[in-house]
Amino acid sequence: MPKSAKSVDLQGLLDAVLPHVAFDGWSEAALGAGAADLGADDQTIKALCPRGAIDLAVAYHKRGDDQMAAAMAEADLAAMRYSERVAFALRQRLAHADREAVRRGTALFSLPLHAAEGAALIWGTADRIWNELGDTSRDVNWYSKRAILSAVYSSVVLFWLGDESGGDETDAFIDRRIGNVMQFEKTKAQLRESKTFGPLMRGIGQALSGIRAPHREPASDLPGYWAPEGQEK
C-alpha cells in the first residue's frame, strides 16, 4: 500500500528516487517515478523540491557529507597523523556514495546552469572535513585549505568513477594526492626560510594578512533579526 502524501519527507523521497537515477539521471523522470512509488501528490513534491530533481541531487550530496561526518566522529582520529585523518575523511565520503548516482550528479553539475552550485557543494564538503578536523584558522589559510582540499576531492571523485580495481587504486591515488599537498606545504616552508625568497614570501603574507574567514553566525544588529527568548545577544 503506498504511503500517504503526509508521510513523505525529503529523505524518504530521495530514497525512493535513487533506484531510478541510474536509468534516468537526476531528472524529472526519476523524480516522477520515485513520487509515484510513494504515492505522493504533485503538491507535496513541489513543496519538498521547489526546483525539481536538482534539489534531490543537492540533498544526496549533503547526505553524503553528513554520513562522512558521522563516521569521522566515531573514529579515533587522534591516533592518526594529520594526513591520515584527511585521507580517512575522503575514503569515508566515497564509502557512503553510490557510484552511479555520483556519476549522474557529476554530469548534472557540469552543466553551465548548475556548475556554480556543484562547485559550492564540493567546497562545502571540503569545509565540512576541515571543521570536523577542528580547523581553527580564520585568516587566508581558511580559504587556502578549503581550496586545496576541494581540488583534491574533485580529482579523487573523478578517479574513483573510473576505478575498476575494487577501490585499491583509488586508495593509492588518495595517498598520492595528499602526499602532493604535503610536499607543497613543505616547499612553502622552505621558501619562507630561504634568504632569496623569504622576503618575497613574507611580503605576500603581509599583503594577505587582512583576509578573514566568513562569520559563521548571522549579524544580530541588522533590521529584522530575531532570536528566541533567552538567546538574545
Image (cartoon, helix red, strand yellow):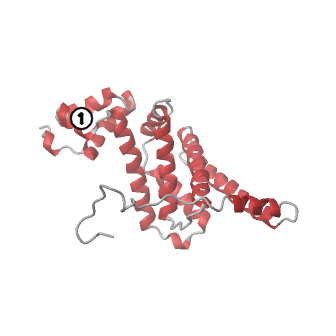
Label 1 sits on residue: 46
Which part of the image, by quadrant, shows the N terminus?
A: top left
Quarter holding residue 227: bottom left
Which part of the image, by quadrant, shows the C terminus?
A: bottom left
Using the image, determine if residue 35 lies above or below residue 145. above
Give the camera-side residue of 110 and 209. Answer: 209
Asked whether residue 119 appears in the rendered view, the answer is: yes
At 56% from the left and 65% from the top, the residue drawn is 137
At 29% from the left and 55% from the top, the residue drawn is 224
- Residue 219: % across, % down: 39, 60
Question: In the structure shown, which secondary structural element does the residue marked by tag 1 occupy?
Answer: helix
At 15% from the left and 45% from the top, the residue drawn is 7
Q: Decide if residue 145 is on the left or right side of residue 62.
A: right
Q: Decide if residue 21 is on the left or right side of residue 231.
A: right
- Residue 3: % across, % down: 14, 40
Residue type at numbered disc 1: Lys
